[in-house]
Image: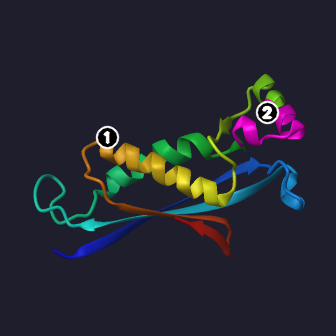
């Protein structure tokens, strides 16, 4: 059976800062991220998703749960071991004022976000019965710059 790739794309807005970075990204700033989630597998031969790699509905739900519900219009923070005093102060302020925030288990770079998104989506899809599959993630931080895993 042939391997086929399907892709779902979403965009969201959020803010972050890169503690310890030497350039402008050390400052609080925001991006309109574009994320492309590609799933490559053989087509399903039986069940409710016959002739599909994955039901787009399931992929959309996994992306909503893993990415959109956590990151859209949030301030995202690196895990504590990567935060400097300024980012820690911002984290405390965001908590105090009940801002929408999300704490990453790593740094908030596009590279780490792509790894984290793939991990979450794989867990979600495996949890609803999909067998392990090849999932690639592209995280565009700007219209011309992306990280991919």
Q: Where is residue 129 in the image (x, y as percent from the top left)?
A: 24, 45
Q: Main secondary structure of the magenta part?
A: helix
**In this image, 47 relative to 74: left or right?**
left
The magenta stretch spans which residues?
A: 78-91
Label 2: few (<14), some or many (≥20) within 10 Å?
many
Q: Where is residue 83 in the image (x, y as percent from the top left)?
A: 79, 40
Dot label at residue 25: none
Q: Which residue is drawn at 88% across and 52% down?
A: 27
Q: Position of residue 147 (x, y in %)?
A: 61, 67
Residue 149, above or below 96: below
Quarter in which the N terminus is drawn: bottom left
Quarter of image, res 148: bottom right
Residue 37, above or below 119: below
Q: Residue furthest left?
A: 46
State the separation of the CA atoms marked 2 and 1: 32 Å
Front one among 119 and 66: 119
Front one among 22 and 125: 22
**In this image, 36 relative to 99: left or right?**
left
Residue to which mark 1 is pinned: 127
**In this image, 34 relative to 17: left or right?**
left
Q: Position of residue 47 (x, y in %)?
A: 12, 53
Residue to which mark 2 is pinned: 91
**In this image, 2 relative to 124: left or right?**
left
Front one among 99 and 148: 148
Instruction: Say whether marks 2 and 1 touch (CB < 8 Å).
Output: no
Residue 34, above or below 128: below
Q: Which residue is drawn at 63% across and 69% down?
A: 146
- Does the segment drawn in magenta span residue 124? no
For numbered disc 2, what is the local secondary structure?
helix
For numbered disc 1, what is the local secondary structure?
helix
């Amino acid at each position: 059976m042939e391997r086929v790739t399907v892709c779902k794309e979403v965009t969201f807005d959020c803010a972050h800062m890169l503690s310890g970075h030497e350039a402008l990204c050390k400052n609080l700033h925001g991006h309109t991220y574009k994320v492309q989630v590609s799933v490559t597998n053989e087509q399903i031969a039986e069940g409710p998703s016959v002739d599909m790699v994955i039901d787009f509905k399931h992929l959309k739900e996994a992306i909503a749960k893993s990415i959109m519900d956590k990151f859209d219009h949030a301030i995202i923070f690196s895990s504590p071991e990567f935060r400097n005093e300024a980012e820690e102060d911002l984290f405390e302020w965001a908590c105090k004022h009940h801002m929408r925030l999300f704490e990453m288990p790593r740094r908030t770079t596009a590279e780490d976000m792509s790894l984290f998104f793939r991990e979450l989506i794989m867990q979600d899809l495996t949890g609803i019965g999909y067998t392990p599959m090849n999932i690639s993630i592209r995280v565009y931080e700007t219209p011309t710059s992306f990280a991919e895993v």
